[in-house]
Image (cartoon, rainbow, N blue to C red):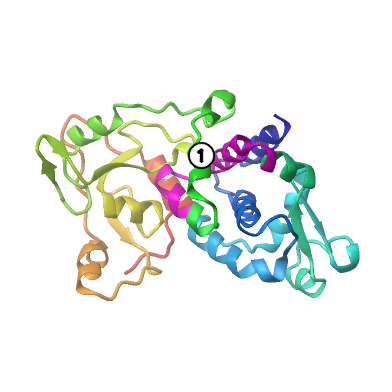
């Protein structure tokens, strides 16, 4: 269990609710490379473009270059870094790493145990996903990191990690509560849909992510359609305490459908829950704006 303990410590080092998933993203990328190409060094200069894309898509709005986690992950006992000829890493300076032909690799003992025990590999991937990202992003992230999607499907992690995963309790009835509070309508676009007696296409969207102590309650959740939920988790959409909807300037959508379903939301007021139900807490809205929304917003 030594490796699982080291993986969980990566999460415990984050402070103040700030997202810092860059080491986790590097590990997921390295495990994806291990699965697809075998155990061999990863050259920084070759991996940098792919890591930049991963960080941009799944990291927080504040940009961090790949050089820092590539160098600093070695302090966690999971990764080792060296320059050409076996020389030590020159440090986290991107230009020096490129000039020195720096390469990194997962620790050989770590790799040996993962390859010998597929369940361990799955547990490690699941921990990295559960402690850094919302569940709706997991499959997209596995694909972007080059991971085989089935590695994230193990259900044994929660039992081992009792006391280590985020302390927020999952509420199995939260979707029903949110549907009632928002009258079975998307708070952003008003969509509603049914098939028989089942509501379809409406989901619970958290402001503060579960991985960062986001609670499953009305003060932290919105009712959104599947499209707007995905865009909300990706930072394309946001919201301010007054209820005004934000659309990121970084979003590009040229078709009339994109303009109608996304761009035209900018500046609209989201539908509040029905009277008698709690509204989203300003602190949770602020967390999403700082840690997820990819500002600036459109004017």
* Residue 23 among magenta residues: no
Residue 231: % across, % down? 34, 56
Q: How many labels does the image show?
A: 1
Residue 21: % across, % down? 58, 49
Q: In this view, does 46 lie above or below 143?
A: below
Report the quarter where the C terminus lies.
bottom left
Residue at 41% across, 40% down: 283
- Location of residue 55 (image quadrant): bottom right
> In the depicted view, which residue is nearer to us: 274 or 94?
94
Q: In this view, does 219 lie above or below 289?
A: above
136 vs 77, left or right, is left
Residue at 74% across, 59% down: 40
Pointer 1: what residue?
A: 130
**Outermost residue, left side:** 196
Residue 31: % across, % down? 63, 51
> In the depicted view, which residue is nearer to us: 41 or 251?
41
187 vs 240, left or right, is left
Residue at 59% across, 49% down: 20
- Location of residue 100 (image quadrant): bottom right
Instruction: Mark yes or no: residue 183 visible.
Output: no
76 vs 184, left or right, is right
Give the main secondary structure, helix, strand or loop, of the magenta stretch: helix
Instruction: Mark yes or no: residue 70 visible.
Output: yes
Residue 181: % across, % down? 20, 34
> In the depicted view, which residue is nearer to us: 243 or 146?
146
> In the depicted view, which residue is nearer to us: 84 or 166?
84
Q: In this view, does 241 lie above or below 47?
A: above
Disc 1 is placed on an element classified as helix
Residue numbers of the magenta segment: 115-141
182 vs 104, left or right, is left
């Amino acid at each position: 269990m030594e490796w699982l303990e080291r993986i969980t410590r990566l999460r415990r080092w984050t402070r103040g609710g700030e997202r810092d998933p860059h080491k986790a993203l590097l590990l997921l990328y390295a495990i994806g490379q291990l699965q697809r190409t075998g155990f061999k060094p990863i050259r920084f200069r070759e991996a940098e473009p792919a890591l930049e894309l991963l960080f941009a898509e799944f990291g927080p709005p504040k940009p961090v270059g790949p050089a820092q986690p590539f160098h600093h992950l070695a302090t966690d006992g999971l990764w080792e870094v060296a320059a050409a000829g076996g020389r030590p890493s020159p440090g986290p300076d991107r230009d020096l790493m490129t000039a020195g032909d720096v390469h990194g690799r997962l620790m050989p003992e770590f790799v040996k145990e993962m390859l010998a025990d597929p369940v361990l590999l799955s547990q490690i991937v699941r921990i990295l996903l559960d402690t850094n990202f919302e569940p709706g992003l997991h499959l997209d992230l596995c694909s972007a990191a080059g991971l085989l999607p089935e590695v994230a499907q193990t259900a044994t992690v929660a039992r081992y990690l009792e006391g280590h995963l985020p302390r927020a309790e999952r509420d199995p009835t939260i979707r029903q509560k949110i549907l009632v509070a928002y009258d079975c309508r998307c708070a952003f676009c008003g969509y509603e849909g049914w098939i028989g007696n089942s509501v379809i296409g409406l989901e619970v969207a958290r402001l503060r992510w579960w991985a960062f102590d986001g609670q499953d309650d009305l003060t932290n959740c919105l009712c959104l359609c599947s499209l707007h939920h995905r865009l909300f988790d990706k930072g394309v959409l946001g919201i301010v305490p007054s209820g005004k909807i934000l659309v990121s300037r970084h979003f590009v959508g040229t078709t009339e459908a994109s303009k109608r379903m996304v761009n035209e939301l900018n500046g609209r007021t989201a539908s509040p829950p029905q009277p008698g139900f709690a509204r989203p807490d300003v602190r949770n809205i602020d967390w999403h704006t700082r840690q997820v929304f990819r500002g600036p917003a459109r004017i």
